[in-house]
Image (cartoon, rainbow, N blue to C red):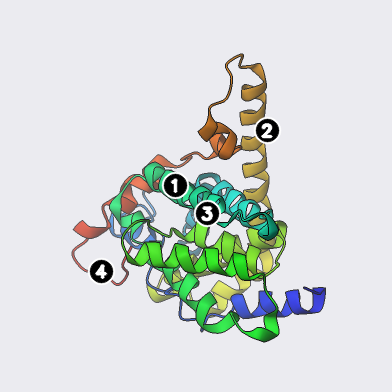
Amino acid sequence: MGEKNSDLLLLLLSDSNLPTGGFISSSGLESFTHHGMLSPSSSSAAGSAGSGKTLEERTVAFWENAVVAYANQGLWFLIEAHRTLEGMNSKRGERALVLEKILELDRRYDTILMNDVTRRTRAQGLAHLVLFEKCFVVPEMKMDGEKVQVLKEFKNAARRGECHAHQPIAFGILCAALGISSKRTQYLHLFLYSRSILSAAVRLNLIGPYASQRILVTRGDDVITRALSSTEKLSSLASSSSQRSDAAPTKAEVMLNGLKNSATTNPLMEILSGRHDVVHSRMFNS
């Protein structure tokens, strides 16, 4: 796929009007707010959100740390899912093996999530798979039929309850099928996650719509780049640890190379996100 078409696809996938359920989640911000962690007297683990900071500054502190924490937890699953489908050789009949690897990635990602509230965001992953089938699987796209079939089978498995279709996995294979590079996929995914948190902050009346756009313009690239860098550092530590080990890697370790660097780096945020359902009045699903 040419660079021009790739740029168009990036614009389409970043459209806030896509029916993928991006606005049903606050990524823990609603629960964090209702538990008083953004109050002036709180010095929370979301960053320097303590006394002397404006509400906008405290919200931005949450946003920055949430993006980095999400990248540390889920970005490597996206990278591995993208790499698995992108490297598929359709002529060798690898579809079943590739699908099984993707299903295993989905199962492993589900096990590291700390609460059912976070797991509910998998609905967005299934929505992306439906979007792919209904909007992008057309003759004009000239996509690899075997790769398209992998996405369809993954979607059908999710509907049968055989897998979860978590967002990082689904988005990774969607972009791989469309011919979008891994680097661009990672950046786009974190941008969409960043934007959804700021959008939630607007609806929670923590910041205004103009402030939301100003924050993205002035700080969005730095935050996303820092999140990507943080993930790369975790990868380097995991690689060093693997090189020092004398034990032969298991089949699962070989298949899921690099996933050791997935980590929960902000447990307080995860705990409060899990308490979303006990909030008396809720606007978001999670």
Q: Position of residue 150 (x, y in %)?
A: 53, 63
Residue in the foreground of this view, choosing between 267 and 11: 11
The quadrant of the image that shows the C terminus is: bottom left
Q: Position of residue 22 (x, y in %)?
A: 45, 72
The quadrant of the image that shows the N terminus is: bottom right
Could you say which disc has been placed on residue 96 in the image?
A: 3
Question: Label 4 sits on what residue type?
Answer: Arg
Could you say which disc has been placed on residue 282 in the image?
A: 4
Labels 4 and 3: the sequence-earlier one: 3
According to the image, label 1 marks what residue? 109
Q: Residue furthest top?
A: 246
Q: Is residue 211 above or below residue 161?
A: below
Q: Is residue 211 above or below residue 154?
A: below
Labels 1 and 2: the sequence-earlier one: 1
Q: How many marks?
A: 4
Labels 4 and 1: the sequence-earlier one: 1
Labels 4 and 2: the sequence-earlier one: 2
Labels 3 and 1: the sequence-earlier one: 3
Label 4 to label 3: alpha-carbon separation: 42 Å
Which residue is painted at 46% across and 65% down in the image? 153
Callout 1: SS: helix
Question: Label 2 sits on what residue type?
Answer: Ser
Of badges 4 and 3, the one in the foreground is 3
Label 1 to label 2: alpha-carbon separation: 20 Å
Label 3 to label 1: alpha-carbon separation: 20 Å
